[in-house]
Amino acid sequence: MEINDDAASNLEQLLESLIKMVGKANKNVDSLQKRVSQLEWLIREQQLEIKERGPIQFYSRHPHESANKFPIHLE
C-alpha cells in the first residue's frame, strides 16, 4: 500500500503543479491581450489624427527642386 500512497501523492503534487502553471500562463495571456488592446487603441487614435491633419509634404532644401517632387500621403 505504501507504493500506491507514494504514487498518489506524486500524482497529486504533479496535478497541483500543472494547475499553477496553467494559471500563470493564463495570467500572462491576459496581460498580453490587455497590452495588445492598448496598442491597437493608440494606433487607431494616431490614424485619426493623421486623417484630420491631411497629407504631409516634405519640401526640398534646394530651391531649384520642386516641392511636389516629394509628396507623401498617409491614409
Image: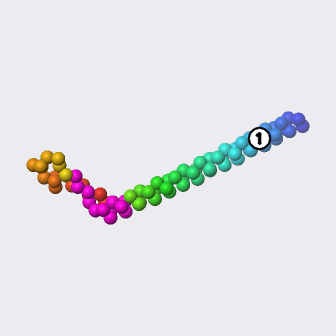
Question: Disc 1 marks which amino acid?
Answer: Gln
Q: Residues within 10 Å of mark 1 (few under 14, many from 20)?
A: few
Displayed quadrant of residue 73: bottom left
In the displayed orientation, state which residue is furthest to the top: 3
Left or right, 61 with respect to 16, comes to left
Residue at image x 83%, y 36%?
A: 6
Q: Give above or below for 9 relative to 48.
A: above
Q: Position of residue 46 (x, y in %)?
A: 38, 58
- Which residue carries the number 1 mark? 13
SS state under label 1: helix
Residue at image x 54%, y 55%?
A: 34
Q: Which residues are magenta?
A: 47-58
Q: Nearer the viewer, residue 44 or 59?
A: 59
Q: Position of residue 62 (x, y in %)?
A: 14, 46
Q: Position of residue 28 (x, y in %)?
A: 59, 48
Q: Is residue 57 magenta?
A: yes
Q: Position of residue 30 (x, y in %)?
A: 58, 53
Which quadrant would the C terminus be assigned to in this image?
bottom left
Residue at image x 81%, y 40%?
A: 9
Which quadrant would the N terminus be assigned to in this image?
top right
